[in-house]
Image (cartoon, helix red, strand yellow):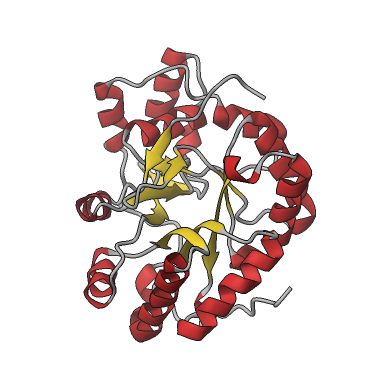
């Protein structure tokens, strides 16, 4: 374990969340327990999973084996679109809580909006509001919601989402969405915070990890490009959720609390934005195209 203490961010309902988390997207179940145990040993105290990832049970097992007090680890998971609807979403909590082995989940969010069936999205969120009122979750939120989705949601519900987990990295900054979230008092959570998807830039097949601007900043600070990008998120008051199953990279991603980027460096990273999305287009999410059967156990 490192000696770093991860700073907390305060959500709009007063609950605190570590500024840096550890994600298990696309981590196979058979590798999840070891990866999460490594992350916890390094010092991470926020674990982000989802019903759609198929590894909630292994995350729960890793937490149990760690011996760390429950109130020391912030656990976040997501309800998938095939479980939207008021009663279905209430049941989705029971499925996730059972797999995680938890009575209470720290943060439960809707994984996507369903633009073509937004009534189901609203009913799902109202179920989250009920779970919050009943003390079964400590905070609720959304993921991949665009400004119009947020406006429609807020017009029909009571609780402002605590977070919006969205794709943000130097090549896809989503500045307008970041501003919208902030204006509503919603914390921006960055998935793919170091741009894990390859992009074309300046007619060359490159990635953020190979970008010369980021590389030069990294060299100045004696850090890696990944560490610079994670620091960029934290200094702009975003919560970042990197993922890796490689122990050395899990530790590397955590080693970002002993340096700071200058305003000029932050601005130069902002300027790398291409406007190119790597993940699915939120407006094209439908149950037909993205259906997943979330098992009971």
x 64%, y 80%: residue: 293
- Name which residue lies at 31% across and 51% down: 12
Q: Is residue 288 visible?
A: no
Q: Position of residue 49 (x, y in %)?
A: 59, 56
Q: Which quadrant of the rendered structure holds the N terminus?
A: top right
Which residue is nearer to you in this view: 91 or 211?
91
Against 122, is 214 above or below? above
Lateral position of residue 68 relative to residue 205, left or right: right
Q: Could you tell me residue 288's position as x and y percent?
A: 51, 86
Left-right relation of 108 to 243: left
Query: Percent x, y for residue 134?
Result: 47, 68
Q: Position of residue 51 (x, y in %)?
A: 60, 67
> Is residue 275 shown to the viewer in this render?
yes
Residue in view at x 32 percent, y 47 percent: 173
Quadrant placement of the C terminus: bottom right
Above or below for 42 versus 193: above
Q: Residue at x 51, y 50 (%)?
A: 197
């Amino acid at each position: 374990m490192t000696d770093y203490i991860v700073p907390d961010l305060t959500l709009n309902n007063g609950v605190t969340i570590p500024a840096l988390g550890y994600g298990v997207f696309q981590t196979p179940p058979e590798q999840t327990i070891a990866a999460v145990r490594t992350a916890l040993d390094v010092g991470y105290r926020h674990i982000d999973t989802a019903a759609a990832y198929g590894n909630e049970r292994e995350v729960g097992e890793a937490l149990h084996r760690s011996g760390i007090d429950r109130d020391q680890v912030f656990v976040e998971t997501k309800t998938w679109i095939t479980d939207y609807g008021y009663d279905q979403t209430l049941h989705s909590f029971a499925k996730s809580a059972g797999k995680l082995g938890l009575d209470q989940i720290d943060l439960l969010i809707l994984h996507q909006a369903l633009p073509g069936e937004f009534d189901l999205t609203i009913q799902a969120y109202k179920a989250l509001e009920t779970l919050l009122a009943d003390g079964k979750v400590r905070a609720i939120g959304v993921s991949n919601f665009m400004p119009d989705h947020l406006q429609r949601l807020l017009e029909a519900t009571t609780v402002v989402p605590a977070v919006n987990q969205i794709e943000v990295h130097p090549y896809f900054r989503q500045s307008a969405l970041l501003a919208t979230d902030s204006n509503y008092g919603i914390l921006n959570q960055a998935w793919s915070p170091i741009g894990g998807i390859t992009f074309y830039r300046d007619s060359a097949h490159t990635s953020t990890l190979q970008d010369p601007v980021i590389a030069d900043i990294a060299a100045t600070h004696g850090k890696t490009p990944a560490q610079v990008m994670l620091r960029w998120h934290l200094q702009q008051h975003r919560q970042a959720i990197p993922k890796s199953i490689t122990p050395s990279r899990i530790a590397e991603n955590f080693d970002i609390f002993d340096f700071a980027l200058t305003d000029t460096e932050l601005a130069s990273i902002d300027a790398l934005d291409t406007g190119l999305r790597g993940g699915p287009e939120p407006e094209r999410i439908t149950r037909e195209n993205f259906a997943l059967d979330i098992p009971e156990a």
